[in-house]
């Protein structure tokens, strides 16, 4: 994958995460780097955090994933 493909991949991952979580994440961030993918944002449930993570794994099954989504008290 070239560096020019990274913004397109990041946008695709953001679209998939939003679709799988029903847009229940705030301040969603997806960063793709040579070492893996970093997810960030805020939600009110661990379930939504896991949905976001698994939507990335469906697209990039072997990738190293750092899930920094914070679960906030409702």
Image (cartoon, rainbow, N blue to C red):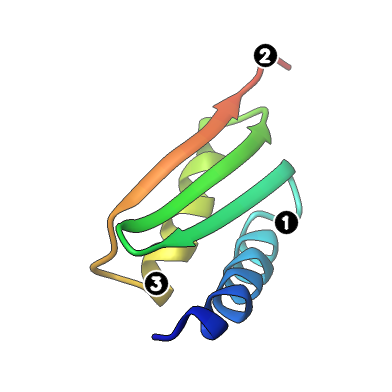
**Residue that appears at 30% across and 58% down:** 35
> Residue 62: horizontal and vertical position, in percent?
23, 68
- Tag 2 secondary structure: loop
Q: Depth check: give the residue in front, 54 or 39.
A: 39
Indicate the quadrant where residue 25 lies. Answer: top right
Circle 1 residue: 22
Q: Secondary structure at mark 1?
A: loop
Q: Considering only vertical position in the picture, is 48 above or below 53?
A: above
Identify the residue at image location x=53%, y=75%: 6
Counting the numbered discs, the total is 3
State the separation of the CA atoms marked 3 and 2. 28 Å
Q: Residue 73 bears which disc, if any?
A: 2
* Image quadrant assignment for residue 43: top right
Mark positioned earlier in the residue sequence (3 or 1)? 1
Secondary structure of the residue carrying numbered label 3: helix
Given residues 19 and 3, the one toward you in this image is 3
- Quarter containing the N terminus: bottom left
Marks 2 and 1, how far apart at CA: 19 Å
User: Residue 54, image x and y in percent?
Assistant: 42, 58
Q: Horizontally, is 24 left or right of 54 in the view?
A: right
Q: Is residue 69 left or right of residue 11?
A: left
Instruction: Look at mark 3 in the image and give the residue it sits on.
Output: 58
Q: Quadrant of residue 30?
A: bottom right
């Amino acid at each position: 994958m070239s560096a020019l493909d990274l913004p397109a991949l990041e946008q695709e991952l953001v679209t998939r995460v939003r679709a799988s979580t029903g847009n229940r994440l705030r301040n969603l961030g997806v960063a793709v780097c040579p070492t893996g993918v970093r997810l960030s944002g805020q939600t009110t449930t661990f379930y939504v955090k896991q949905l976001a993570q698994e939507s990335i794994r469906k697209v990039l099954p072997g990738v190293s994933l750092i899930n920094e989504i914070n679960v906030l008290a409702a």
